[in-house]
Image (cartoon, grey):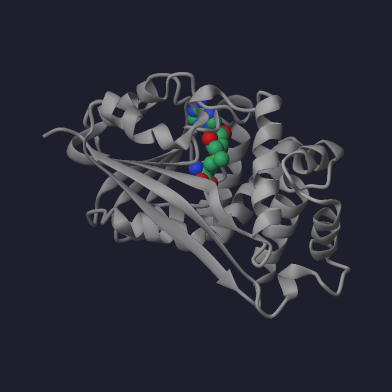
Amino acid sequence: MINSDSAYAEQELLYNRFMEPALRSAINHLALPPGSIGLDAGCGPGGLLHLLDAASGGVGYTFGTDISSPLLVIAEREIQSHNIEDRVGLFCASLGQPLPLPDDCLDWVWSADVLTSEGAKRGFPEPAEVVKEMARVVKPGGQVALFLGNRLGAVFIPGHAHIENVLATAVNLNYRKQDHFHPAFHNENVLSWMRAAGLTQLRMSAHITEYQHPLHPDVIQYIQKYIFEEEYCPLPELKQYAHGIGLSESEWQTWLDISNPQSSNYILTQEDYYCVRFGTLATGRVLK
Ligand SMILES: C[S@@+](CC[C@H](N)C(=O)[O-])C[C@H]1O[C@@H](n2cnc3c(N)ncnc32)[C@H](O)[C@@H]1O
């Protein structure tokens, strides 16, 4: 395993812990039948397999698949750490290709933040085809569930709405310039992909993660490392975009101050701090 795989897995598992309230809510929303058999498509390092196992009553069977063998090695460790080896199994496959499973063999397929993650963080060129292949392996009446984390509307810098709005827009402009995402990236199209795949009873629901002071160290670590230092990072190009769309120099200095763990104004340890982030869950059923 190369270092970048373990660093990626560490980031993903930390993100899973941060988003756990929203993920649990979304998985509960599925009301998986006890004893059901399902697939976590694009399970990565396997941080959600124990939640899916528990949601099917701890008496079903959950498969996890991913294109990355190194991530599946880490997923195997996750499975062992939760003592669920007898109810969870892994296989390596690419979701862009036919799955190595017969038609109508599963009760459900769950997939979290995968359709937007092909290659270098790009979306699949034909997301509806990937959903169609998921639907093929689900029995009539069974569910396909696509969870997608969403940065729109997140609050990580409460009390500084203008700074946060401008930084979030600057990040998006920067991504766009770097051609970071395939045009199909837009999460908001997920229902049309499901409809094109022939699924019925399409539903969208939002699931929230919220935290308030005092924050768990994992929450501080996630926000500091991946939101403040990676997304809203003080790179010159981000600052330039932010200034171009209305962030003043004094607001930029405020941002540097409140995002600095050494500052007495560090926002993540203030008594009135809170944060909110949500994910969307799109579900559809295979026609009976
Ligand atoms: C953002 S991670 C999400 C992992 C996991 N679903 C979770 O929520 O923790 C995206 C995952 O999609 C996997 N992936 C990307 N392209 C894939 C493909 N063509 N087939 C299968 N998995 C793929 C990546 O290897 C990675 O593990």
Quadrant in which the C terminus is drawn: top left
Q: Is residue 84 visible?
A: no
At x 23%, y 57%, the residue is 34
Most foreground residue, 1 or 141:
141
Most foreground residue, 169 or 41:
169
Horizontal and vertical percent position of residue 165:
64, 51
Horizontal and vertical percent position of residue 156:
64, 60
In-image side of 139 versus 152 (left or right): left
Q: Is residue 187 visible?
A: yes
Q: Quadrant of residue 195?
A: top left
At x 74%, y 74%, the residue is 269
Quadrant in which the N terminus is drawn: top right
Q: Quadrant of residue 255?
A: bottom right
Horizontal and vertical percent position of residue 242:
76, 43
Q: Residue furthest bottom?
A: 271
Most foreground residue, 164 or 202:
164
In-image side of 258 versus 60 (left or right): right
